[in-house]
Amino acid sequence: MSGRGSGSPYAPHTDAETEAMLDAVGVDDVEALFDIPDSVHFDDKFGIDAKSEQEAVVETKKRLRRNDDLTEFLGRGHYEHYVPSLVDHLAQRSEFLTSYTQYQPEVTQGFLQALFEYQSMLVEITGLGVANCSMYDEATALAEAALLAKRVRAADGDRVLVPDYVRDGHVSVLENYTNGAEVVVERYGTDAGNVDVDALADAIDDDVVMVYAENPTTTGAVEEHLNEIGDLVDDHDALFCLGSDPVALSLLQRPVDVGADVVVGDASVLGLPTSYGMGLGVFACREDFLRQVPGRLVGASEDADDNRAYTLTLQTREQHIRKERATSNICTNQAWVALRAAIHAASLGSEGLVNLAERMVELPRDLAADLDDITGVRAPVHDRHHFREFLAHTDQPAPAIASDLEAEGFAVHAVGDHRLQVCVTDANEHAADRLVAAVEEVTH
Amino acid sequence: MEHYDQAAYRQVDDDQYEPLLAEKDETTTEVESPLPDELTRDELELPSLAEPELARHYVRLSQQNYGVDSGPYPLGSCTMKYNPRFTEDVAALNAASVHPDRSAESVQGTLELQHDLQDYLGRIGGMDAVTLQPPAGAAGEFAGILLADAYHEANDEGHRDEVLIPDSAHGTNFASAALGGYDVVELPSGDDGRVDLDALDAALGENTAALMLTNPNTLGLFERDIERIADMVHDAGGLLYYDGANLNALLGRARPGDMGFDIMHFNVHKTFATPHGGGGPGAGPVGVTEALAEFLPEPHVRQTETEKYERYTPEHSVGKVHGFSGNWLVLVKAFAYIDRLGDDGLSDASAKAVLNANYLAEQVDYNVPLGPFHHEFVASAGDQDAADVAKRMLDYGVHPPTTKWPELVDEALMTEPTEVETKDNLDDLADAFNAVAADDTETIENAPNRTTARRIDQTSAARNPRLSWYDLD
Ligand SMILES: Cc1ncc(COP(=O)(O)O)c(C=O)c1O
């Protein structure tokens, strides 16, 4: 990394090589190769000093170290489970990390097989016939689902219904993606943390192309009306899109059994630590929508020796072939995150996943009970089963409590004037007792 | 099965092999839960492997995969440069691992890094403000379309419903404009492979919302008339959008902002060396001029007078294009890369990328029309089928170029060696091109022969889709 002057440390040319190459090209100076008119030539500097690798590490660390070291009890769509060490070691294999989309399947069988396995796991988990090999995140996957619904529904329609607990940010993404298709996104009511089936029945009509619901919901409740929602949506010939994740679905009702047509969600609950919201968009749907699926699909085939082989398939759906008529504009996706999730899932297996999911029901139940013992706190707010997280009512203003808790080293959501949201998983359960003590302290 | 591999496959019959992870029958787990039965599924059937087997399975798969670290990867338009590994370590720091709903006061480090990356990208692109939210280039394009839309609406010009795109542009440009609800007007390129000013003039009008341009374009050619183009678009009341996929050609020598672009995206997984990860994740930050800054997605990050950092919602924000803040860990890597290279390194990266492309173009026997090239060139396979050429190149142990695109060149071989190849590597790469150029049709049609899998039947894959274990016989 030294002795090469001040250029890029990753451009390996010696001076002699550079000279020989310039000679071969027939110019004296590399600048002569740039066909840029003087009037737009940039003659200044960016003002960024080059650094050694060590200095660059220090610079990045220096900034990130300014983050307070809080124990997070945060969820609402972005979760952490313990990621086995092996996941990182395997995903970091250069051959995986430094490759790109499998345009040449004959030399990328490894990644293709891993993605095929990822798709297969989602098919097993959802019970739906097709899963693609990733969208960016849950919000964009939800938006793609609405666009698919608009395309596949036989009768015209332009309404998409989402429950009122969905994050505003997710709804914003959904609206931005569907505006161009003239879809109108509307919220419908909930009751005690679950879908209010009557409110949904009032809201739905034949203009509705898709109804969205979550299990568990953004506020952690296990949804108890999925069958009714599925029937209602079916009666209006709309698509039922269910939001969830692969850990929750290892335990909760299988989407296909409740009439879900599309499943979206975030699979980065497996394989990725908390990452400021970086995601892995799940997209699975019924097989009859196959030609309308957004994003990449890996399929099995045979090679010239008749051996099993994998390849990207049905690419005529995609932007590089279909351009403005593609099913989506996505190109670069989240393949490496999918690889990580697949490794994590394979290391847990069915038993590990189900056990983990069961813990995600027990942990919030126990923590809510402990918080409920504190005077001035009522938890959970909704008389439901919960998964990972729940709402707690506080007599005192919740934002003030959250900020006091921060001073004690804990991060929780304040989601209303008198509501906290608390998320507990295997990643932070060790600190649950301390959180309870801290809540007790700051509320008294 | 010739390449039978115990760690990745199991033999189920005399001549039948299945991927090892498909062995799922014995691992059914009945669900016995803390929930009432009606709220749970009955069973889950997923494969499970003990850790040593799992390690071998994925290591074996990795050995059947070609990456930049395996050898030359001149995949045109994708900028497959070396990914410095120290950036992996900084992204893996505990302090990078925070929840997006943390209070601004408690994540000053994250906000500072976001702010500083916004600042770096602004300087590199010549843009006044930058959002880091779009999770890939195409998502950046779409964000750019939303911004243009909001801008025109705010100026009572909401009737503008056309986006102009040259025929040489990447498919995502068309798809992103359509996603935003715009009609796409495809501009035929001139004989020199660049924007045809007459065609542009004819297409521009009161309905023009924007022109999306890649510069240098996908043929590796700089749009020399860029100032004239910018004037024409602006005079018609449109905005000029820069597709940053090819920015590796210009670092330190020209900036989209100075060329008259109003909106641009960066492909950090190309220009700033974050790993492509078998297809992603990338990141597609978007830069804009002052006039568009008020429309940027929220939350945006800025520095306060007290030297702190805060999130805020720009006055007329378009809202969000990603559930949270985009592909954060990728952005950390990009910051570290830019910070390491600095002015000199970035400028040298472009110099060597352009030198490498021009040198390689000189060495290949295939016809290379057009020019002069920047960071990539497009050769023509002539009488050969470009897809066959690519398959045969695999036999020579290198990754082939992008094929059959842009369509302006017959049987296109779109080649981007990037700055990371030595002269020797380029000579070897040229030898591979030239050996294939001399191969007969039968040989190239039957290639590859020395790869993990031989030529894969695409037709049967598409005609009889088998997309999971359940579709396998
Ligand atoms: C010219 C061009 N534009 C846009 C894109 C889209 O970028 P991304 O794949 O990051 O979405 C690509 C990438 O593949 C490209 O080559």
Image (cartoon, coloured by chain):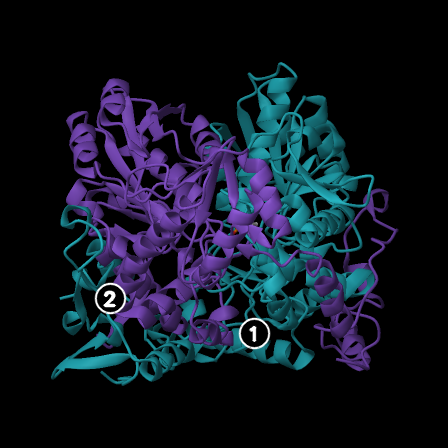
Chain colours: A purple, B cyan
Residue A137 visible in this rendered orientation of the protein: no
Residue topped by disc 2:
A350
What is the quadrant of the C terminus of chain B in the image?
bottom left
Of A270 and A435, nearer the camera is A435
Residues behind callouts 1 and 2 on a single chain: no
Per the image, label 2 sits on a secondary structure element best described as helix
Residue topped by disc 1:
B72
Relative to A187, say whether B253 is above or below: below
Disc 1 from disc 2: Cα separation: 40 Å
Question: Looking at this rendering, what residue extends furthest in the right direction?
Answer: A44
In the rendered image, residue B446, in percent from the top left (x then y), is placed at 33, 74
Mark 1 crowd level (few <14, some 14–19, many ≥20, 10 Å Cα): many
Of A356 and A274, nearer the camera is A356
Q: Residue at x 72, y 49 (%)?
A: B121
> Looking at numbered disc 2 in the image, what kind of residue is underneath it?
Ser
Q: Residue at x 39, y 40 (%)?
A: A219
Chain for numbered disc 2: A
Residue B307 visible in this rendered orientation of the protein: yes
In the rendered image, residue B399, in percent from the top left (x then y), is placed at 49, 71
What is the quadrant of the N terminus of chain B in the image?
bottom left
Which quadrant would residue B256 be assigned to in this image?
A: top right
Per the image, label 1 sits on a secondary structure element best described as loop
